[in-house]
Image (cartoon, rainbow, N blue to C red):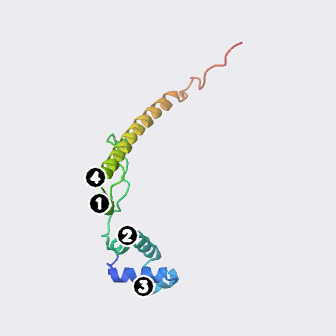
Amino acid sequence: MGEKRSLKFKVSLVRRLEAGERITDLERESGVFRAQIYRWRDAFGREGEAGLERRPGRRRGYRRSRSAEGGPSTGPAPSAPAVAALDQLAPDVRAWVSELERTVARQQLELDVFSEALQRIEASRRPKSAAGETASTPPSRR
């Protein structure tokens, strides 16, 4: 497991990268892999210093659909900044956003149902592959 880097260290690397220093030089000097420096840059660009204070672990985002497992499908997990931004909106806007979220969830359920039905129809239309059976219908006679 990698060592924990200070916020000041991360910000310093990101600012140097943004100032035009070569990633190879930063990587060699700091001992941090370039992929990590790029992740810090992206997090800093999205959320400022707060994005660099994240704890290690699983990233938040889209959860795996449980529809294949028989459960309801889940959408994206709202991040803390998204929830905080929603709390600052006017009540009528919050109600509108909530209604949109419900609509999206309902549509996702409908898509799951239709996808399953389509798979069943396609499975029933597959040609027979048992020995001695015809794979297609016989030609029509004229």
What amino acid does circle 4 point to? Pro
What amino acid does circle 2 point to? Glu
Q: Secondary structure at mark 1?
A: loop
Between the residue at mark 2 and the residue at mark 4, the CA separation in whole angstroms equals: 25 Å
Between the residue at mark 4 and the residue at mark 3, the CA separation in whole angstroms equals: 48 Å
What amino acid does circle 1 point to? Gln
Frontmost of labels 4 and 3 is 4
Q: Position of residue 111 (x, y in %)?
A: 42, 39
Q: Please determine whether, in this image, residue 135 is positioned above or below residue 89.
A: above
| The label number, if any, that marks residue 88 in the structure image | 1
Q: Position of residue 124 (x, y in %)?
A: 49, 28
Whichever of labels 2 and 3 marks the residue nearer the N terminus, that label is: 3
The residue indicated by pointer 3 is 30
Residue found farthest to the top: 142
Q: What residue is rendered at 43% in x and 70% in y?
A: 42
Between the residue at mark 2 and the residue at mark 3, the CA separation in whole angstroms equals: 23 Å
Q: Residues within 10 Å of mark 3 (few under 14, many from 20)?
A: few
Whichever of labels 2 and 4 marks the residue nearer the N terminus, that label is: 2
| The label number, if any, that marks residue 78 in the structure image | none
Q: Secondary structure at mark 4?
A: helix
What amino acid does circle 3 point to? Ser
Frontmost of labels 2 and 3 is 2
Q: Position of residue 122 (x, y in %)?
A: 50, 31
The residue indicated by pointer 2 is 47
Q: Residues within 10 Å of mark 1 (few under 14, many from 20)?
A: few
| Image quadrant containing the N terminus | bottom left
| Image quadrant containing the C terminus | top right
